[in-house]
Image (cartoon, grey):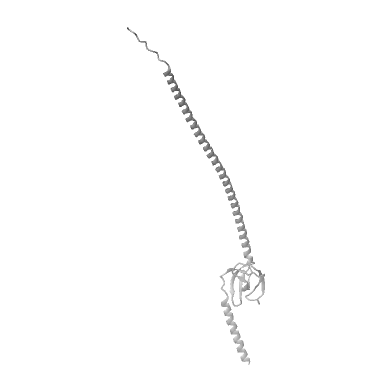
Amino acid sequence: MTKFFLQIMGLGLLFGLLINQASAQDVQAPGNEQTVYISDDLYTFIHAGPGRNYRIIGSVVAGTPVTLLQRNDEEGFVEIIDDKERTGWVDNRFISATPSVRESVPQLEEALQQAQSDVAQTREQNDLLNQQILDLSSRNEQLQSRLQEIQQQHSDVQQELASIDNKVQIEWLTRGGIIGLGGIILGVILMLIPRKRRRNDNWM
């Protein structure tokens, strides 16, 4: 019985050594540090070793960016360096490769503020362009009105010139008629004036 018990103990120790070797192979080699984030829980504890049976050396608030040093997939823990430069192990379930809400919200707020600033600037530029369009429209209406005035003045001048030309023609015709009539009257008068008879010398 005692011999059988010792054999069982020996197999147990051998099995334990095999598990330790497998665990050592599962541990990520150091030197491949990367930035990861504590997931959106309230906080998680940092342990001195890869397991909950190791003493707690602190806690990390949710959303805090931490540096990943290595993984222990057998125990489900990862070794990190937190924002306070503490090195320890946390549960792998609380690690995320994407920024948490705590990390993303400030960036989203900054992007929102930038977008609002861009919108305000665009509105200001749009208002300025609308004002310029109104000014140009008003200027165009003034120019159109001035053009109509010039066209009306041009039409009036054309009519006045035509009227003057007609008056000149009538005046010339009138003068010509008067001169012609005067000539006719003068001719008639000359014809009516008796001519002097020539004296005939009578030699008889």
What quarter of the picture does the N terminus occupy? bottom right
Q: Is residue 162 left or right of residue 124?
A: left
Name the spot of residue 16 as percent of width and height, x first. 60, 82
Residue drawn where x is 43% and y is 18% of the image? 192
Which residue occupies the foreground of this view, 180 or 8?
180
Name the spot of residue 197 as percent of width and height, x first. 38, 13
Tell me: residue 164, above or below residue 128: above
Residue drawn where x is 57% and y is 47% of the image? 137
Residue farthest toward the front in the current orientation of the protein: 204
Which residue occupies the foreground of this view, 158 or 172?
172
Image quarter of residue 187: top left
Residue farthest toward the top in the current orientation of the protein: 204
Tell me: residue 8, above or below residue 69: below
Residue drawn where x is 52% and y is 38% of the image? 155
Q: In this view, does 148 lie to the left or right of 193?
A: right
What quarter of the picture does the C terminus occupy? top left
Which residue occupies the foreground of this view, 141 or 90?
141
Tell me: residue 41, above or below residue 10: above
Residue drawn where x is 62% and y is 62% of the image? 108
Tell me: residue 199, above or below residue 77: above
Residue farthest toward the left in the current orientation of the protein: 204
Name the spot of residue 179 as percent of width and height, x first. 45, 24
Name the spot of residue 175 as percent of width and height, x first. 47, 26
